[in-house]
Image (spheres, rainbow, N blue to C red):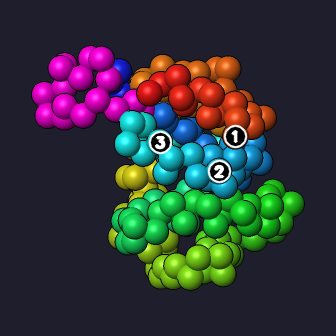
């Protein structure tokens, strides 16, 4: 949970006086892609890095069944190559249309994973082993090595009552006025007020 900078004294371990912007995004959602693109293409996370911590939060939309697979790949990048996470998110957002429902409805889970990994590699040169995403055959319905991560992120979003993407929280509170339609200038005006 985020903590307003003015309440930093309540933190037992971290005395940094920074604001937190949590971006609950779905990698298969065009509105999430638009919001991410506005922030990234205008270098806003870099511009404000001394005073604002931007956090990507997984908001997996269950009505796009492939969304859990795309997010699982990003979770694997976070484990395997954490310094490339930002690139991986940006790369998959740029190619998200190739993962829309109409492009994957006839594919198996393994075929979808392979497609995601190919897109990731083409966009970022990040290579992951498909076996990371294979089902644990030693346990009935045991998922894969990243299932625990998926459960954590889904629980986190649910606990914060996040229902749609994109959703943005600032210092722990939802900011329902923030929209994927916001321009870089609107973001800048908003973020300047936080400093």
Q: In the drawing, what numbered circle is on residue 48? A: 3
Q: Residue at x 60, y 80 (%)?
A: 121
Count neighbours of disc 2 (C-alpha within 10 A) and say few if under 14, some if 14 to 19, many if 20 or more.
Answer: some
Question: Picture quarter containing residue 53?
Answer: top left
Residue 19, visible in the rendered structure:
yes
Q: Residue at x 69, y 51 (%)?
A: 37
Q: In the drawing, what numbered circle is on residue 42? A: 2
Residue designated by label 1: 184
Residue 82 position in % (x across, y down): 39, 65
Quick check: marks 2 and 1 in contact, CB under 8 Å?
yes
Count neighbours of disc 3 (C-alpha within 10 A) and say few if under 14, some if 14 to 19, many if 20 or more.
Answer: some
The mark that comes first in sequence, 3 or 2, is: 2
Q: Is residue 143 left or right of residue 182?
A: left
What is the secondary structure assignment of the residue under circle 2? loop
Q: Is residue 104 above or below residue 118?
A: above
Q: Nearer the viewer, residue 29 or 14?
A: 14
Q: How many numbered discs sit on the rendered protein?
A: 3
Q: Nearer the viewer, residue 58 or 68?
A: 58
Residue 180, visible in the rendered structure:
no
Q: Residue at x 59, y 76 (%)?
A: 124
Per the rendered image, the range of residues in magenta is: 5-20
Q: Nearer the viewer, residue 167 or 13?
A: 13
Calculate the distance from the C-alpha at mark 2 to the C-alpha at mark 1. 7 Å
Q: Is residue 153 above or below residue 194?
A: below
Calculate the distance from the C-alpha at mark 3 to the C-alpha at mark 2. 11 Å
Q: In the drawing, what numbered circle is on residue 124? A: none
Q: Is residue 56 left or right of residue 137?
A: right
Residue 106 position in % (x across, y down): 81, 68
Residue 176 position in % (x across, y down): 64, 20
Quadrant where the N terminus sits is top left
């Amino acid at each position: 949970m985020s903590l307003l900078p003015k309440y930093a004294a309540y933190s037992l371990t971290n005395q940094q006086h920074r604001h937190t912007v949590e971006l609950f995004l779905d990698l298969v959602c065009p509105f999430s892609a638009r919001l991410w693109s506005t922030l990234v293409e205008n270098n806003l996370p870099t511009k404000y890095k001394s005073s604002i911590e931007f956090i990507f939060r997984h908001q997996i939309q269950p009505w796009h069944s492939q969304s859990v697979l795309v997010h699982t790949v990003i979770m694997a990048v976070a484990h395997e190559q954490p310094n490339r996470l930002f690139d991986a998110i940006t790369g998959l957002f740029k190619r998200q249309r190739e993962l829309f429902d109409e492009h994957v409805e006839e594919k198996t889970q393994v075929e979808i994973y392979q497609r995601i990994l190919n897109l990731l590699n083409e966009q970022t040169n990040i290579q992951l082993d498909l076996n990371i995403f294979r089902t644990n055959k030693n346990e009935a319905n045991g998922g894969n090595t990243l299932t625990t991560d998926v459960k954590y992120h889904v629980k986190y979003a649910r606990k914060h009552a996040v229902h749609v993407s994109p959703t943005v929280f600032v210092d722990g509170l939802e900011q329902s006025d923030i929209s994927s339609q916001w321009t870089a200038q609107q973001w800048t005006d908003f973020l300047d007020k936080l400093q």
